[in-house]
Image (cartoon, helix red, strand yellow):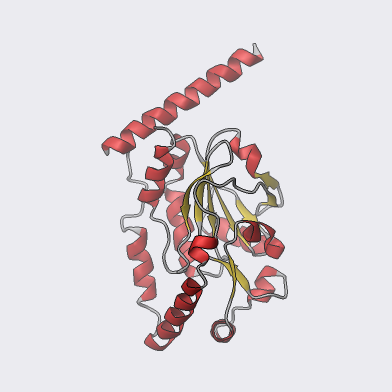
Amino acid sequence: MAKHSFANCKIMLELKANSSLKKLMTGNMNMSDQPEQTLETQLRKLRERTSAETTIIYNKSVQDLIATNIEKTALQKGVLAPDFTLPNATGQEINLSALLVNGPVVLTFYRGAWCPYCNIQLRAYQEILPQIHELGAELIAISPELPDGSLTITEKHHLAFPVLSDVNAVVLRQYKVLFTVPENIREIYLKAGLDIVKANGVATWELPIPATYIIDSDRVIRFAYTKPDYRERLEPKTLLEQVALLRK
């Protein structure tokens, strides 16, 4: 009886996902839960609030990071995604392979609860979480912050997906998305009252690029967004389209 129940449940999930795929591909999926403005528009408005002097410094640091080729050296489409187990905001251990049993996983790396760009991104992803689930996928977010930071951003935006803490950046290194914050940017952060060392609980100034991956049930990366500019993020619409492609 249990075997039949499991099989029936799996069939229902596949039917639901296929229905969502058809709606998305034909433009009939209800997207009313997405932000009225695109994510890019919201991020651009935030960028415009930064002073011209600081913007020049940030632009230079981004160009320097791009020159390291991190966009290409970060894990890419087609490779096996490293498995991991990390604590969520309440201390519960979350394992990637365990989530993949039920379907694909969208994995996004963010800098921390202190980052306004990350807050906008995760809030936008929360708004499309029902569509992600309809497509049979799950969403998780990882930062190098201490669990208190994960709890802060989870509660602030009422996030209903796992927000995990990768203290010591073990997983970030495995996915090759980690970089060291340059000295001049550290000075700007500290003057603004932001201490990355304190937020992350380790004596290093390391952060991830805002990478987003879609991982299939075989733990293979099927889509990789690895742009190093922290002011740019993967659009929710594009994310949904890429998740839907796994069902074709």
**Residue 7 position by quadrant:** top right
Residue 132: image location, x then y, percent: 45, 41
Residue at figure coordinates x 61%, y 39% from the top left: 99
Residue 70: image location, x then y, percent: 52, 66
**Residue 207 position by quadrant:** bottom right
Note whether 221 is above or below 203 in the view shown.
above
Residue at figure coordinates x 41%, y 65% from the top left: 232
Q: If the image is split into quadrants, where does the C terminus sit? A: top left
Asked if residue 47 can be seen in this view, the reply is: yes
Residue 156: image location, x then y, percent: 54, 60
Note whether 23 is above or below 232 in the view shown.
above
Note whether 63 is above or below 126 in the view shown.
below
Residue at figure coordinates x 66%, y 71% from the top left: 199
Residue 41: image location, x then y, percent: 32, 64
Lateral position of residue 242 relative to residue 211, left or right: left
Return the residue nearer the eye: 223 or 187: 223
How many discs appear?
Answer: 0
Return the residue nearer the eye: 220 or 123: 220
Lateral position of residue 9 relative to residue 35, left or right: right
Q: If the image is split into quadrants, where does the N terminus sit? A: top right
**Residue 95 position by quadrant:** top right
Residue at figure coordinates x 33%, y 31% from the top left: 22
Asked if residue 28 can be seen in this view, the reply is: no
Farthest residue toward the top? 1
